[in-house]
Image (cartoon, rainbow, N blue to C red):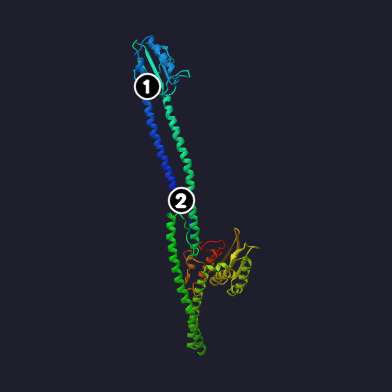
Amino acid sequence: MSLLNPSKGWRSSSSRLLALYSTLFVAWSCILMGVLYYEVSTYLDSLAKHSLMQRQHLFARFEGEQLVEALATSMTFDMRAIDAYGLFDEQRRPLSGPIRLIPDDLPLDGTIHELKNCIDSDDPNLPRDSCDAVATHTRDGRWLVLVRDNGSLFAVTRIILHALLWGISLTIIPGAAGWHLLRRRPLRRIRQIQASAEAIVAGDLTRRLPLSDRRDELDMLAAIVNAMLERIERLMHEVKGVCDNIAHDLRTPLTRLRAQLYRLQQQAEEGSPQALQMDQLLAEADTLMARFRGLLRISELEDQQRRSGFLVLDPLPLLHELHDFYLPLAEEGQLTLVLEVPTSLPSLTGDRALLFEALANLLSNSIKFTPPGGEVILRGLDDGGSPRLEVLDSGPGIPPAERAAVFRRFYRVDENNAQGGFGLGLSIVAAIVSLHGFKLEVGSSERGGARLSLDCRPSLITEN
């Protein structure tokens, strides 16, 4: 079992909540800016039309030369390129004012109209973009055209728009910085919790999840988990103690029982039915004692205090010793035992005797289940600066559905196989691998049999 890596970026809940809050804040700010812009634009538009209407009513009181003088006087107070006028005779010929031509799309009805293209002229001081215009008939029969550029008042809306955009940008920048800083603290705590959880999963039930002084939600959850771990550790020790005591206490009566059976066997006549029954009883007693020894061995290996004796060692001499030790057994079974190692391998940290026991279990299993004429390979590899030790064979292999179950105690792939053991060999291997923090992978070899690979980098036992 492996733990997930801590969430990064947008996957973490804190990042998502902060991003959601920022998105809602920006969306609400945009809505507010849009409403404000619309209200100001509507108000300024009505204000511009009202101002133009007042000018129209003012100049409607004059006629003749008084009208010309009033128009000329108004130009001294009006801003050029914003307000403009044009006075035309009855035949629409220009008489005075900067506007020399009545716009084609301006109806002569005395009503204010909005023009998309205001004045078509070479004079840069005349309004050119959108404007409000009105053409009115004076008392003396002439035509007066009044124009007011919309951009003059709408400059205020642009100022408001720019201010809102700056406000939003200045809010987003510290918001993004705050999002980055606020999500780092929970992720750092999650990584600390994950490190402790991985150690607990690896078998160190004495570890506890870290607690901070803030006593927040994570601390509440960690405290609950720690209470559960304390209860589980206590129950595990109680169960383990009972099992160990049973196994230990039964060894003495079983040893006495076997001694009595052996005396009875010696007293029976050779070849008699009583002697044959004694042989079977002795075999059963030896099987029981071997199982109890295996259980006690696993219990001993699960004690994490054995790590204190770990040393840095070279795996090459260990592989050569294993090959030499099991070569006669392989030849006796008409098998070929091959050692494939490079000239050097990276060192590893562990208990040499325990690693020898683990690899010996794997080799003996391969030799036991590989039919005569087959091949067993003991291989050492340099896997990215860490050693990888493998045992491969040409036997029947381990079915994929049972590769995770073979590490359970008393589990055997084929219960009817006469060569099957007690189902404790791979359990002992798993206990040794877990003690070292290595990774044991079960797969298929290139020769069709099983491949058991020991990755000597700290990890957990998994299925390949």
Q: Name the spot of residue 356 as percent of width and height, x first.
A: 58, 70
Name above or below for residue 48 compared with residue 388. Answer: above
Residue placed furthest toward the right: 343
Q: Residue at x 44, y 58 (%)?
A: 222
Instruction: State the residue in front, 443 or 310.
Output: 310
Q: Name the spot of residue 116 as percent of width and height, x first.
A: 41, 24
Q: Name the spot of residue 231 as percent of width and height, x first.
A: 43, 66
| Three-letter amino acid code of the residue under disc 1 | Ser
Figure label count: 2
**In 3D space, how far apart are the residues under numbered discs 1 and 2 (Cα atoms)?**
58 Å
Residue placed furthest toward the front: 213
Q: Which mark is residue 12?
A: 2
- Residue, disc 1: 51
Indicate the secondary structure of the residue bearing disc 2: loop
Name above or below for residue 127 compared with residue 319. Answer: above
Mark 2, other Cα within 10 Å: few <14 / some 14–19 / many ≥20: some
Q: Which mark is residue 199?
A: none
Q: In the figure, residue 142 lies in which quadrant?
A: top left
Name above or below for residue 322 compared with residue 144. Answer: below
Q: Is residue 396 visible?
A: no
Mark earlier in primary sequence (1, 2) = 2
Q: Residue at x 39, y 16 (%)?
A: 145
Name above or below for residue 441 compared with residue 418. Answer: above
| Three-letter amino acid code of the residue under disc 2 | Ser
Q: Is residue 223 visible?
A: yes
Mark 1, other Cα within 10 Å: few <14 / some 14–19 / many ≥20: few
Indicate the secondary structure of the residue bearing disc 1: helix
**Residues marked 1 and 2 touching at CB (< 8 Å):** no
In front: mark 1 or mark 2?
Answer: 1
Q: Name the spot of residue 349 as percent of width and height, x first.
A: 59, 64
Q: Residue at x 38, y 24 (%)?
A: 48
Instruction: State the residue in front, 1 or 41.
Output: 41
